[in-house]
Amino acid sequence: MNTKKALVCLAFTLFLATASSVQAAGTDSRYFVKSTSQFWKKSFQVRNVFDSGFTANLSDWQLKVAKVFGVEVVPVKKLNILAAATATPTPVKKTTVKSPIKTPTSQIGWGIKSIYGNTLGNSLPSGGEGVNVAVLDTGALISHPDIKSQIGVCDDFSGAEPFVKNVCEDKNGHGTLVAGVVAANGGPEGKGIYGVAPKSNLMIYKVCANDGTCFADDVASAIYYGVDNDANIILLSLGSDSESSLINDAISYAMSKDVMIVGAAGNDGPYAGSIDYPASNINVVSVGAVDNTIIVPDWSAQGINEASTSYSKNTGDIELVGPGVNIESTANNGYYMTSSGTSMAAAHIAGLAAKEWQTDAEYPAEATRELLHKFSLDILPAGDDSASGWGMPQL
């Protein structure tokens, strides 16, 4: 292709880039452009930049231009705060949520009591001082009295602009729920609800739209940002049936910086291998659910533990389980709500990791992960099984 033709195509691309990207922003037209060239970054409206390329919302016309010039583009994968639907026509069981109430049924829920075991007594939950937990979700109600003093960061990666500081409005509610399980502190008057680690610091990163969908590049970008801004633990109560190379790379980066990532296993059990991604990633502490009788519910996704090396986290394994049925927590209207799902279970484990964070260890994340294994109460069937892994950590 001669230079004149190339310049003509570029001129049209530049002319239409803004309008077409606005049109594409409301569609499923997010792509990863496998190029580091400034030429293409100027031609397309860049959203997130990575080592091997960048993401952008592309119109059909822009895709054709990229193909003409031999630029490789691939669709960006999507995740969801709820279990992703599979090919089966049977609807996937999703996280259940009950109507909000103005005062908590119990200030210390059964899940918190189970995690604390016999150590709580007549005391209130405590701990997590100085530990930063990044919650990558639908945002949070930062004015909720039970979590507002624990929220130090509130940023949005999911909007029309790729990154907006000091904004993380939660119109879905899921993010506020999991944040409360981690760090609710009873509120200024001590009459609210308590999470596992009420002294921990919450870094709220809105990576999912109000309908609960999340683009993988936004999630990956938030992981990198959280790691670079002193997150100790990253909570991912979101999932998909297929993996994303962008998120995989971000998880590897987090591991290299000794940051723990906790992921919800998903709600589409009870079949072996039904665990969602990114919980299935070998570097993610994957968490399934148990009910108040410490039994794994049928809908909690399962790993492939019984086909892999016992008591060694392998790709596709469940590692731990946590309380995930009828969990009361903070709601995005300032009140309280009861919900079920592995999202709640993962939040309990992230909170426990914050409470027991091994600050003085050479590698705190690794040491804390080993401690969670040591604390785990085996769940039947005995051993490292596909439904419950090591079991449920309990103090």
Image (cartoon, rainbow, N blue to C red):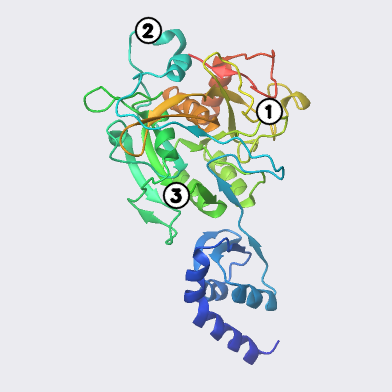
Q: Secondary structure at mark 3?
A: loop
Q: Is residue 382 left or right of residue 28?
A: right
Q: Secondary structure at mark 1?
A: loop
* Residue farthest to the right, as pictured: 307
Pick whichever of labels 2 and 3 is earlier in the sequence: 2
Which amino acid type is shown beneath numbered disc 2? Gly
- In this rendering, the answer to whether 133 lies above or below 27 is above
Q: Position of residue 179 (x, y in %)?
A: 40, 34
The count of marks equals: 3
Q: Is residue 294 left or right of residue 194?
A: right
Residue in the foreground of this view, choosing between 230 and 88:
88
Q: Which residue is mark 3?
A: 210
Crowd tier of the residue under label 1, counting other residues whose Cα lies within 10 Å: few below 14, some 14–19, many 20 or above? some
Residue in the foreground of this view, choosing between 90 and 271:
90
- In this rendering, the answer to whether 267 lies above or below 243 is above
Crowd tier of the residue under label 3, counting other residues whose Cα lies within 10 Å: few below 14, some 14–19, many 20 or above? some
Crowd tier of the residue under label 2, counting other residues whose Cα lies within 10 Å: few below 14, some 14–19, many 20 or above? few
Q: Which residue is mark 1?
A: 270
Numbered mark located on residue 231 in the image: none
Q: Is residue 390 left or right of residue 99?
A: right
Q: Which residue is mark 2?
A: 121
Q: Is residue 98 visible?
A: yes
Pick whichever of labels 2 and 1 is earlier in the sequence: 2
At 60% across and 31% down in the image, what residue appears? 286
